[in-house]
Amino acid sequence: MLEPRLADLPPGVGEQVRAVRAGLRDRVLATVSAAMRDQGRSLGGGQGRGLALGVETAVDAFVTAVTEPGGDLTGTREVFVRLGRTEYREGHTVDALRSILTLGGREMWAYLVDRDLPPDVLYVLASALFGFVDMLAGAAAQGYLDEQRDQARDWETTRRRLITLLVQPDPAGSPALRAAADAARWPLPETVALVSVEGTDAEHVARLAGSGTIATVIGDAVRLAVPAPETPGRLAHLTSVLSGRRAALGPSVDLAEARLSYRMSRRALELQREGVLPAEALLICDEHLVTLITAWEPGLAGRLADLCLAPLGDDPVLGPTLLAWLEAQGQVIPAAAALHAHPQTVRYRLRKLRRLLGPALDDPGTRLALQLALRRS
């Protein structure tokens, strides 16, 4: 019940209120219509019908509550829940609807005051009326938030479908990709970069990134699709947004190559978690290609190291010496400087390496394999 004291009103009060129902509807409808026009809103079509239905339902429900206290208001609440949903779909704010409801409630009160009802009756009606308006506003707010939540889920679904199409093993055909992009309201760019970010707050990260970035959660991380990543300032902003969390940026590629960018960023994030790659805010995959290649398939780099470096045995200085010499392109002096060792010491170690590795040390392919193995050992 809106107001328990309604049941104690004199019997004639209900009839007085019922008798002015039509005038009450007309007055409230006129006032609310003027308020909507002031907000620049259309009074035609579905919006106009919704307005008329809301006013009629509210007035009838309040009159019924006065004449038949204790009645069920569930149907009235549902009408305003639907109106709240409509408000969201049509792009209005919940505060705009609340202000209109408040104005309508005041107009109902002013109309009732003009009926020369006794003060003690007006006090009870005032308490009931403004409680009634609060209930309607709460129902409308519930509908507004329900629609907002439902549409957010819909958007999440469309964005996830679009990103999935971009990164799936078999490239999607142009019609399917365009249809998914249209559904997500995402203009297809010429180039895109995929970013893998630690966490599951896809919507929050995409909103911070801005510039048409869309996101979803695939696996255990957020995957961002960043359009035209080469745009000046875009990556700097993204780096700032992702400060404090692990993230990896795949290369900028044509849409048809989006899966490559995704796979690189995904693997780089995994390597960040494992401590193989730096845990910086936005790791650029293109700057760590050697590490990505050698660590792409777990176990392969270890197998390479086992095979290539077996002749070196357990000597702790031979591996670092060989790597420094290879990186110095076979020059002893730079290798010694890198090792902070005397050149003669390096020459001694190289003679030992030649005995262990033999002529293979002069083979370009073997040198590449050794260098890769040493980097991962």
Image (tube, rainbow, N blue to C red):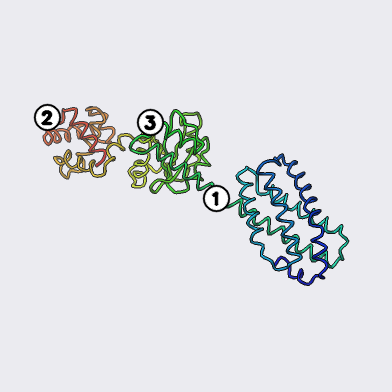
Q: Residue 107 versus residue 253: which sits nearer the camera?
A: 107
Judging by the rendered image, the residue that carries numbered circle 2 is: 359
Q: Looking at the rendering, which quadrant does residue 280 occupy?
A: top left
Q: CA distance from mark 3 to mark 1?
A: 33 Å
Q: Position of residue 38 (x, y in %)?
A: 75, 41
Q: Is residue 64 above or below residue 340?
A: below
Q: Residues within 10 Å of mark 2 (few under 14, many from 20)?
A: few
Q: Sequence-wise, which precedes: disc 2 or disc 1?
A: 1
Q: Amino acid at mark 2?
A: Pro
User: Along the horizontal axis of the image, is 18 left or right of 137?
Assistant: right
User: Along the horizontal axis of the image, is 104 left or right of 334?
Assistant: right
Give the number of the mark in front: 2 or 1: 1
Q: Please report the residue visible at 63 percent of the width from the left and 56 percent of the height from the top.
A: 78
Query: Is disc 2 placed on a helix, strand or loop?
Result: helix
Q: Sequence-wise, which precedes: disc 3 or disc 2?
A: 3
Q: Amino acid at mark 3?
A: Ala
Q: Please report the residue visible at 45 percent of the width from the left and 44 percent of the height from the top.
A: 216
Judging by the rendered image, the residue that carries numbered circle 3 is: 256
Q: Residue 223 versus residue 118: which sits nearer the camera?
A: 118
Q: Sequence-wise, which precedes: disc 3 or disc 1?
A: 1
